[in-house]
């Protein structure tokens, strides 16, 4: 279904449309924002998996005695 979706010609057309829509000054800012978002997502996923491997049973029991 998605065979050949991202061929070089398709990517050039997408880049050209983005250049027309956002302009040459906003395009680097847009790319930087997308890159930072992807980086943050990867860090969040890595932190999430490391927390799950540290304590799979993260339920805490309350053992306080009331007098």
Image: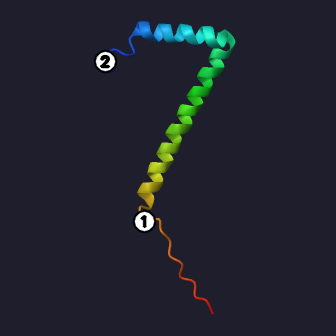
Determine crowd level at label 2: few under 14, some 14-19, many 20+ residues with C-alpha closer than 10 A. few
Q: Which residue is mark 2?
A: 3
Can you give x and y, in whole percent of width and height, for residue 47 in the image?
A: 50, 48
Determine the residue positioned at 52% across, 41% down.
43
Q: Which mark is residue 12?
A: none
> Which quadrant would the N terminus be assigned to in this image?
top left
Q: Mark 1 or mark 2, which is nearer to you?
A: 2
Q: Which mark is residue 57?
A: 1
Q: Is residue 2 left or right of residue 67?
A: left
Determine the residue positioned at 48% across, 8% down.
12
> Which quadrant would the C terminus be assigned to in this image?
bottom right
Q: 54 or 1: which is nearer to us?
A: 1
Dot 1 and dot 2 residues touching (CB under 8 Å): no
Q: 53 or 33: which is nearer to us?
A: 33
Can you give x and y, in whole percent of width and height, for residue 23 in the image?
A: 66, 10
Q: Secondary structure at mark 2?
A: loop
Q: From the viewer's perspective, is residue 27 above or below residue 56?
A: above
Q: From the viewer's perspective, is residue 1 above or below residue 9?
A: below
Determine the residue positioned at 56% across, 27% down.
35
Q: From the viewer's perspective, is residue 50 above or below residue 11?
A: below
Disc nearer the start of the sequence (1/2): 2
Q: Secondary structure at mark 1?
A: loop
Tell me which corner region of the image, top left, top right, bottom left or bottom right, holds residue 20.
top right
Can you give x and y, in whole percent of width and height, for residue 44 in the image?
A: 52, 44
Q: Hey, which residue is sitting farthest bottom in the picture?
A: 67
Determine the residue positioned at 57% across, 33% down.
37
Q: From the viewer's perspective, is residue 46 above or below residue 30?
A: below
Q: Hey, which residue is sitting farthest right in the picture?
A: 25
């Amino acid at each position: 279904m998605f065979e050949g979706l991202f061929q070089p010609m398709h990517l050039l057309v997408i880049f050209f449309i983005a250049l027309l829509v956002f302009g040459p000054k906003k395009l680097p800012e847009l790319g930087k924002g997308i890159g930072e978002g992807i980086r943050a997502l990867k860090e969040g996923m890595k932190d999430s998996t490391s927390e799950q491997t540290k304590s799979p049973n993260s339920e805490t029991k309350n053992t306080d005695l009331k007098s």
